[in-house]
Image: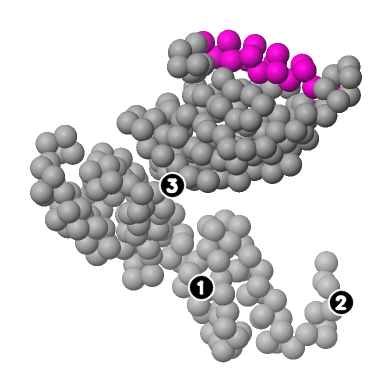
């Protein structure tokens, strides 16, 4: 059905409307975002969109190949045998090859050089991308898309686990707990921690979180220790009296199945 408003549009306005619809279609189907500076005429924008559509169709139809193949299958020393003194030069060589083939990924500051090298040659090289090449086609990634071993993930998981303990409106799920856990320096089944948490929660008719402040991370061999500040009130079941807790807490984190998980908690008013 014809839109009556079309009779009031100039040819350029109609073309602008068509261009907007095509740009939206590109974003929905290919994730390609179109930004216009306003300097292009409607016809020039149409021609640009024609080019983008053709390139996106070729990009999607092209064969998927490992990044290692895309950059020419360079020789490299296995991560288990490369010497410390060769790490920096080898990483630089790989990063240069990636950039030359329009593959971009940044080395996180917190990640040791050997761990970064292992990630590149054992994981990133195997990631498959479109084999289609064009001057405007870049393969851009972040390390966090592949691994969740950064401090921000440990902080997020620790905070989620603590909020899970204090949230009486929800059934306790044991978010981000390891199995087994640690309780008073003894490894215990996760089920024991569930009992301990439920006994703690049953003391209160209401728990009121007031504040949570991430402080720092401390490395301790295979574990990571997350230090935080916390403040909360608890309204006791039965008496209705209020308890107030405030101070520093610590979560012991352990690496389990590709994630930082909570192994133990010691905070004002509760610990396991």
Q: Secondary structure at mark 2?
A: helix
Instruction: Locate residue 36, reporting x and y percent.
Output: 58, 79
The magenta stretch spans residue 195: yes
Can you tell which quarter of the image residue 27 is in? bottom right
Residue range corresponding to the magenta coloring? 189-206
Q: CA distance from mark 2 to mark 3?
A: 50 Å
Using the rendered view, name the quadrant where residue 225 is placed. top left
The alpha-carbon separation of the residues under discs 2 and 1 comes to 28 Å
Q: Residues within 10 Å of mark 3 (few under 14, many from 20)?
A: few
Indicate whether residue 53 is drawn in magenta: no
Q: Nearer the viewer, mark 2 or mark 3?
A: 3
Residue 105: image location, x then y, percent: 35, 56
Q: Which residue is mark 3?
A: 144
| Residue that appears at 70% across and 33% down | 245
| Residue behind mark 1 | 50
Do residues under tags 2 and 3 come within 8 Å of each other at their CB atoms? no
**In what element is the residue under mark 3?**
helix
Given residues 167 and 130, the one toward you in this image is 167
Question: What residue is rendered at 37% in x and 63% in y?
Answer: 138
Q: Count the numbered circles shown.
A: 3
Residue 139, relative to residue 113: is it above or below? below
**Residue at 56% from the left image edge and 45% from the top image edge:** 214
Q: Nearer the viewer, residue 201 or 62?
A: 201
Measure the alpha-carbon separation of dots 1 and 3. 34 Å
Q: Which mark is residue 4?
A: 2
Q: Quadrant of residue 237?
A: top right
Q: Is residue 123 visible?
A: yes
Q: Earlier in the sequence, mark 1 or mark 3?
A: 1
Q: Quadrant of the C terminus?
A: top right
Give the residue drawn at x 50%, y 66%.
53
Q: Colour mode?
A: one colour
Classify mark 1: helix, strand or loop: helix
């Amino acid at each position: 059905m014809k839109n009556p408003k079309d009779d009031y549009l100039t040819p350029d306005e109609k073309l602008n409307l068509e261009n907007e619809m095509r740009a939206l279609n590109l974003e929905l189907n290919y994730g390609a975002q179109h930004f216009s500076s306003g300097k292009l005429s409607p016809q020039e924008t149409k021609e640009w969109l024609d080019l983008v559509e053709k390139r996106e169709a070729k990009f999607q139809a092209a064969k998927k190949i490992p990044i290692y193949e895309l950059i020419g299958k360079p020789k490299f020393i296995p991560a288990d045998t490369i010497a410390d003194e060769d790490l920096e030069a080898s990483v630089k060589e790989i990063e240069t090859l990636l950039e030359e083939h329009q593959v971009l990924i940044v080395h996180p500051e917190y990640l040791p050089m050997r761990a970064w090298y292992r990630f590149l040659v054992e994981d990133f090289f195997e990631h498959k991308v479109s084999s289609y090449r064009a001057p405007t086609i870049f393969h851009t990634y972040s390390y966090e898309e592949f691994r969740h071993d950064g401090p921000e993930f440990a902080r997020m998981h620790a905070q989620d686990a603590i909020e899970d303990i204090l949230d009486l409106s929800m059934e306790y799920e044991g978010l981000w707990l390891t199995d087994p856990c640690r309780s008073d320096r003894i490894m215990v089944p996760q089920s024991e921690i569930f009992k301990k948490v439920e006994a703690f929660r049953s003391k209160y008719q209401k728990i009121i979180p007031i504040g949570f402040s991430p402080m720092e991370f401390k490395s301790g061999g295979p574990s990571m220790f997350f230090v935080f500040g916390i403040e909360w009130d608890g309204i006791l079941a039965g008496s209705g009296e209020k308890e107030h807790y405030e101070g520093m807490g610590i979560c012991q984190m352990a690496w389990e199945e590709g994630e930082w998980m909570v192994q133990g908690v010691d905070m004002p008013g509760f610990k396991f």
